[in-house]
Amino acid sequence: MAKLKPRARIIRTIGDRLISGPEAAIIELVKNAYDADSPSVEITISPHTEKNSGLLTIRDFGHGMSHNTILNDWLEPATDSKNKNRTSKSGKRTVLGAKGVGRFASASLGKKIKLTSTAFVSGKYQVTKLNLDWDIFEREKYLEDIDIDISMEVSETPEPTGVLIEVEDLTTVWDKKKLQKLIRELRRLATPQHSTNQFDIFLNLEKFTIHNPPPYNFNGSEVLLEKNRIVDALQNKDIENTSRNKIQPYHMNDESDYRLNGAFDKSGVFRGQFTIIRGDNVPQEISIDSPSYESGELSCGPFEIDIKIFDLEKESIEKLFSRMGLVFSDFGLRGARTLLSEGTGVAIYRSGFRIRPYGEPDNDWLHLESRRVQNPSKRIGHSQVSGSIYVGSEQESNLIERSSREGLETNSAFDRLIKLITNILVIIEQKRFDFRAKAGISRKPEKNIDKARNIASLDTIIKAVSRLSPAEQKPILLRIEKESQALTKTLDEIEEYQKLLESRAALGMVVGQVIHDGRTFLEPIISSAKSIIDNSPYILEKSKKGELVRKYYPTYGQAIQTGAKGLSSLFKSLDPISGRKIGRPIAFELNKVIESSLNLVSEELIENDITVNNFIEENIILYGYQGDLQHAILNILKNAIFWLSTHKENIKGICLSANTNGKMAQLTISNNGPVIDDKDTESIFEAGFSLKSEGHGLGLAIAREACRHSKGELYLSSNYPETKFTIEFPIEK
């Protein structure tokens, strides 16, 4: 019988070939520190100098390895000890290593290694030291011919436990670019939002100074500090209050334009929320059934998602930075987009640690860019997404990490993971597209008639003609005046036609919304009525069927009543633009309309803890249609209540005041909720414009038409520091 005789250099092959690069090697050693229950890990890198060939140390403060563990586990390639014990010694952490090869990552970092481990064993402190020259695996022929230098000392004197790994004669040139890449990898290694165990990473680069020979002649501490400044800016932290050597885990500021979070169960059913943050910031419930399994497809297990989406137009980024508490002008458009790109990518995490390379800016594993090319106005691109996906263990999810620690194996479970996420993105993209259309973000610039009028005056040509002699000017000026008048008349006609089209477009939107809402209210009425008719023969029957019918009969009536109330409310909201005869205008008291309107929204005011202050004097008499005024007031109050409900102010308030001026009264309604952006002040009265997730954008347009129906007006009088709407209404015939 023959036996395999492993060559000594197979160990170098594991370190040099299986571990993809020096960053991956360091990360594997950092993960080992995490598995050892260490609260932190300290990495120190010293560059090549004339006196030494570079030094890299990694120290942890965990439980350490005993002499026996080093002999039987650490020196045993591909050990399955972590597969057998899936939790750390404390039981608080799920171990990250499983292949048994991460410890040989040091082979790709340098030619020599010193390992010092202190562990508490049987009531005593055991210090084990190991020295290893990796070149020996090239010099010796077979593994069995190699002896490892290892020694142990035992002491009863208390010593800090943990492991110190010192790698000498470095094989990597740690220049500035390489260190920046390492910092980026370490920052993205762990996600602070999802970690239940404190684990800090420290990187000491103080040995890199401007006095070193090239390419090490730079300030290493400043390289780390600069990267941390970006993270702290995004998190609104003070860099001075944190350690200069501590790696600040990367995560984008909680602010974004849109956010999707939720969870898929094992079968692929999704339950979560989608929030339009740049809109009303109100979470919308999202539910999606599981897609069917294809032949041979494996489950990717239950997993959670948290995806943030950004709009990249200049105005959108300015608003985003304002919400983040940053000054856009300090960065500029290019700098702002660069800052956002730091968080580009959707990362996959397991046990609180990122699986490389998912989540890196250049890793579009969801193929978002290829999807976007097909429909750029609707699809979300890779550069617009910052997200996290939290998957289960390999046994639970069938998502297997490659031995090289470079991603997951491309099996059917990984394909299903991509399919599930893509399916939810299709729904989110449509919701985002609809909102952008309503909010005027993707709308084409409107035709500017006033600008055209200025051009039609032909002032530039008249100035040029003025340089001619009076005799030459006269016929030309007459011709110019005639042409200018013709242009102005044409523009007047165009403007009238444009208003007609806008009016018809608004009417079409009203009709569309009525049909949509009407169907929503009508469906339960039809369904319940059918159930009442179909089940009426069993209403008095003494059977299980009869009991069931009698049990559900009240719910049918409740559904009909709810639908009827909805239809009634919908029809009432259309009264101001219905054109029906509503009698003659009358004189009425303003405060009575105010009190009636406040009574109608009293429950909403109480639910949202909103205080109303009414400073309107008694006996202000108005003249017109009382229903017109009440409709406008209710619309403004309901809008104020909605936006105040999305606000985090401790004191939420609505204030009403009024005064008279000549033949008109001015009623002002203000609130201290979110202010209206300057860029939206001209759009809020346009039919179809809305920043609400489920809004139809008709409320203010109809309210203003109601005021105009009574010869009044509605306008936004102030949008800072509070939002103020003013209603002008006649006080006499």
Image (tube, grey):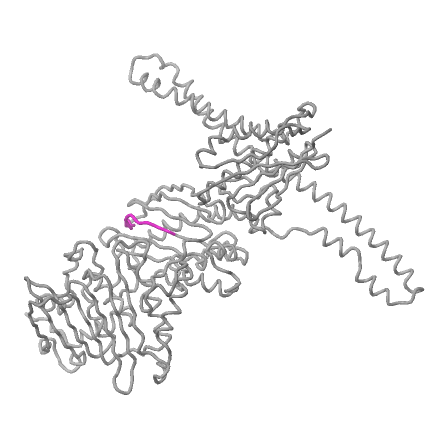
Check residue 144 for magenta coloring: no
Q: Quadrant of residue 123?
A: bottom left
Q: Residue at (26%, 58%) from the top-left corner?
A: 198
Front residue of this view, candidates 511 and 296: 511
User: Split into 4 quadrants, where in the image is the C terminus?
Assistant: top right
Where residue 317 sits: x, y (%)? 51, 57
Residue at image point 40% right, 69% down: 226
Q: Is residue 422 above or below residue 534?
A: below
666 w.r.t. 679: above or below = above
For the N terminus, the image quarter is bottom left
Residue 689's x, y, as percent?
A: 57, 44
The residue at 72%/54% (across/down) is 451
* Image x and y of residue 105, in percent: 23, 71
> Do we see residue 357 in this rendering?
yes
Q: Quadrant of residue 534?
A: top left
Q: Residue furthest bottom?
A: 50
Q: Overall secondary structure of the magenta stretch?
A: loop
State the residue in front, 231 or 413.
Answer: 231
Q: As drawn, is 447 to the left or to the right of 173?
A: right
- The answer to whether residue 469 is above or below residue 524 is below
> Can residue 296 be seen in this snapshot?
no
Write the start and end of the magenta stretch as one range.
Answer: 297-306
Q: Is residue 43 left or right of residue 152?
A: right
Measuring from the top left, give residue 137's x and y in whole percent: 16, 78
Q: Residue furthest right?
A: 471
